[in-house]
Image: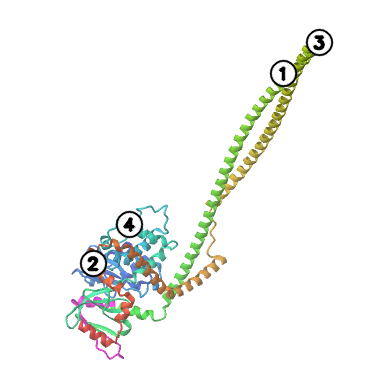
């Protein structure tokens, strides 16, 4: 026996390598893995490996690793996977547990181990994108941002005449509706949709009844289901764990015993290999134990985990609320800054306009001054001409001829001269009025200039104040409010209030299940209608046709299970034997 074993364990999101003692048991290795990844809800998981004959097996915890049929390699490889599934994903307490289930189920859907219709795949892809990228932002996530993401099974891509951009548009429409959902809740929403898929959480095994008919046995969290060979979506009959008293096998023969109070024959089936019997036995025991555990009071460990999970969730809710408040404060500060910048821009434009008015006023004043000067000069010239005309009249009067003809002629001349004088006087008065008007305009222009300068001074003062407010707003927008310690009494009160709200929310989840399922069904139906014209009928698989028949009948996973459990135990056994 080697002193140490080199072990490589592949989890859904990491590869771990260990060196353990050669005589270590499966339990010791499993505990080391769970400690490494911080997992406490370990009862759902197991270590899977391929034995030396090529069959996939689960590592036995009660036996030494080297005593099991493992391949003796330099590094023994195991896969850390969910072996048992909860009846409802809301049972999962730890975020690490939820994340591991999310990654495994997502991979099984993409690899088509779990069948999902095209419309369900689009909805699931939108939650996967929300979990990975957060809230949708059209400015950041431009067309083509999903081009490198593996979001849909190849089967779905081949069945529709749709380009990658068309798929991206449909996924993004749903993605945009998930705004505000944090990563952990997006993963849970993904699992809530996935758990309603017919093949979710079911381990299938080929079996035969006493007649030798080939059938499928499905082992899941609810019980044992029997399927026909060509239909693994709808069970024909089911035996819930509550109706099973004991399970035992001898070689390839399996015997499921009903409760002692039911007078009914045992449920017997046959498998191809003894190792398959051992594998079925492990799954039956584990699922039955979990079935019984769910119907008992939680252990102290589970109670502590749930209390811790509630507290952590409440803290995260409080932290998200604080971040939202900070974002809102930042948005308000940025908005205020934009408003101040816009106001400053308006003031600068107004300032420039008044500067232009001032320049125009100065030009107008200068022009008016020139016009006043010209008018005054013309008035002086007319005054001189007036004096000259008066002098001429005086001289004419003094040198008037004695004769009447000369006197009349002189009078005519005088009349003409007086008319000229009157004309000169009228022109002089008009020029004086023009000069007075120009003086008034000059005075008004000077007053306008004074007002413009006063307004310019006022704008300069306002711009300085706006700049100061702008700097203050920028400082307020960039400064992160101090974060209070969560240990203060105020935060503790908020935390307790959030814990109480979370408790009410968890109690309400079960009541909202039917409404949520109805809403999702309506959304999926609408999406299916939109995509129907692009479907290529020739590329549909057998499971696609089976699923369409289920939808046509108005059935789903839960109603199919209820129907398969109907009837007495004896009647179901008789029906099974006739398959």
- Residue 133: x and y in percent read 39, 58
Circle 2 Cα neighbour tier, 10 Å, few/some/many (<14 / 14–19 / ≥20)? few
The answer to which of marks 3 and 4 sits earlier in the sequence is 4
Using the image, tell me which numbered label, if any, was put on residue 166. Answer: 4
Residue 41 falls left or right of residue 154:
right
Res 367 visible: yes
Queried whether the magenta region covers residue 370, the answer comes back as no
Quarter where residue 361 is shown: top right
- Residue linked to disc 1: 381
Q: What element carries label 2?
A: loop
- Residue linked to disc 3: 404
The answer to which of marks 1 and 3 sits earlier in the sequence is 1
- Residue 321: x and y in percent read 50, 62
The answer to which of marks 1 and 4 sits earlier in the sequence is 4
Tags 1 and 3 touching, CB below 8 Å: no
Q: From the image, which quarter does the C terminus lie in?
A: bottom left
Q: What element carries label 3?
A: helix
Q: How far apart are marks 1 and 3 (CA)?
A: 36 Å
The answer to which of marks 4 and 2 sits earlier in the sequence is 4
- Residue linked to disc 2: 541
Which tag is nearer the camera, tag 1 or tag 2?
Answer: 1
Residue under the point 73% across and 24% down: 426
Q: How far apart are marks 3 and 4 (CA)?
A: 120 Å
Which tag is nearer the camera, tag 2 or tag 3?
Answer: 3
The answer to which of marks 1 and 2 sits earlier in the sequence is 1
Q: Distance between the residues labelled 2 and 3?
A: 141 Å
Tags 2 and 3 touching, CB below 8 Å: no
Q: From the image, which quarter does the N terminus lie in?
A: bottom left
Which span of residues is magenta-colored?
257-283
The answer to which of marks 2 and 3 sits earlier in the sequence is 3
Q: Is mark 4 on a helix, strand or loop?
A: helix
């Amino acid at each position: 026996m080697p002193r140490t074993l080199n072990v490589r364990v592949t989890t859904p999101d990491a590869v771990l390598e260990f060196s353990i003692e050669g005589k270590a048991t499966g339990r010791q290795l499993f505990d080391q893995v769970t400690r490494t990844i911080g997992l406490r809800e370990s009862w759902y998981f197991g270590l899977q490996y391929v034995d030396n004959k090529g069959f996939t097996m689960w590592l036995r915890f009660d036996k030494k690793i080297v005593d099991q049929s493992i391949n003796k390699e330099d590094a023994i490889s195991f896969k850390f996977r969910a072996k048992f599934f909860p009846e409802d994903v809301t049972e999962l307490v730890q975020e690490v547990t939820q994340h591991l289930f999310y990654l495994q189920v997502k991979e099984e859907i993409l690899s088509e181990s779990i069948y999902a219709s095209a419309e369900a795949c689009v909805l699931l892809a939108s939650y996967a994108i929300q979990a990975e990228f957060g809230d949708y932002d059209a400015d950041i996530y431009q067309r083509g941002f999903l081009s490198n993401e593996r979001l849909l099974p190849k089967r779905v891509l081949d069945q529709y005449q749709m380009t990658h951009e068309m798929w991206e548009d449909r996924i993004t429409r749903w993605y945009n509706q998930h705004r505000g959902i944090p990563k952990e809740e997006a993963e849970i929403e993904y699992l809530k949709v996935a758990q309603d898929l017919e093949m979710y959480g079911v381990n299938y095994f080929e079996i035969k009844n006493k007649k030798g008919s080939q059938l499928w046995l499905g082992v899941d969290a609810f019980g044992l289901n029997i399927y026909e060979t060509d239909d693994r979506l709808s069970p024909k009959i089911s035996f819930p764990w509550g109706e099973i008293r004991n399970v035992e096998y001898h070689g390839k023969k399996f015997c499921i015993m009903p409760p002692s109070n039911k007078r009914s024959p045992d449920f017997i089936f046959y498998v191809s290999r003894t190792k398959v019997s051992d594998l079925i036995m492990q799954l039956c025991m584990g699922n039955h134990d979990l079935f019984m555990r769910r119907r008992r009071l939680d252990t102290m460990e589970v109670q502590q985990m749930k209390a811790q999970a509630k507290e952590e969730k409440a803290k995260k809710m409080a932290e998200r609320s604080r971040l939202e408040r900070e974002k809102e404060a930042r948005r308000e500060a940025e908005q205020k800054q934009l408003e101040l910048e816009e106001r400053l821009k308006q003031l600068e434009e107004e300032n420039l306009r008044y500067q232009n008015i001032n320049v125009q006023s100065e030009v107008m004043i200068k022009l008016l001054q020139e016009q006043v000067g010209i008018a005054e000069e013309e008035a002086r010239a007319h005054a001189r001409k007036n004096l000259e005309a008066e002098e001429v009249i005086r001289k004419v009067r003094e040198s008037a001829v004695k004769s009447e003809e000369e006197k009349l002629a002189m009078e005519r001349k005088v009349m003409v001269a007086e008319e000229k004088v009157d004309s000169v006087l009228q022109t002089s008065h008009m020029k004086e009025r023009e000069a007075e008007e120009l003086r008034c305009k000059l005075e008004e222009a000077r007053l306008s200039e004074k007002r413009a300068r006063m307004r310019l001074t006022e704008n300069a003062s306002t711009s300085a104040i706006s700049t100061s407010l702008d700097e203050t707003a920028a400082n307020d927008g960039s400064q992160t409010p101090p974060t209070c310690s969560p240990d203060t009494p105020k935060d503790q009160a908020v935390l307790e209030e959030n814990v109480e709200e979370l408790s009410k929310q968890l109690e309400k989840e079960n009541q909202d299940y039917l409404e949520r399922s109805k809403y999702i069904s309506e959304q999926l139906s609408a999406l299916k209608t939109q995509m129907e014209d692009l479907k290529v009928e020739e590329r549909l698989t057998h499971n696609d046709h089976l699923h369409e028949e289920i939808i046509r009948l108005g059935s789903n996973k839960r109603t199919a299970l209820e129907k398969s459990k109907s009837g007495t135990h004896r009647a179901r056994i008789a029906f099974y034997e006739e398959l």
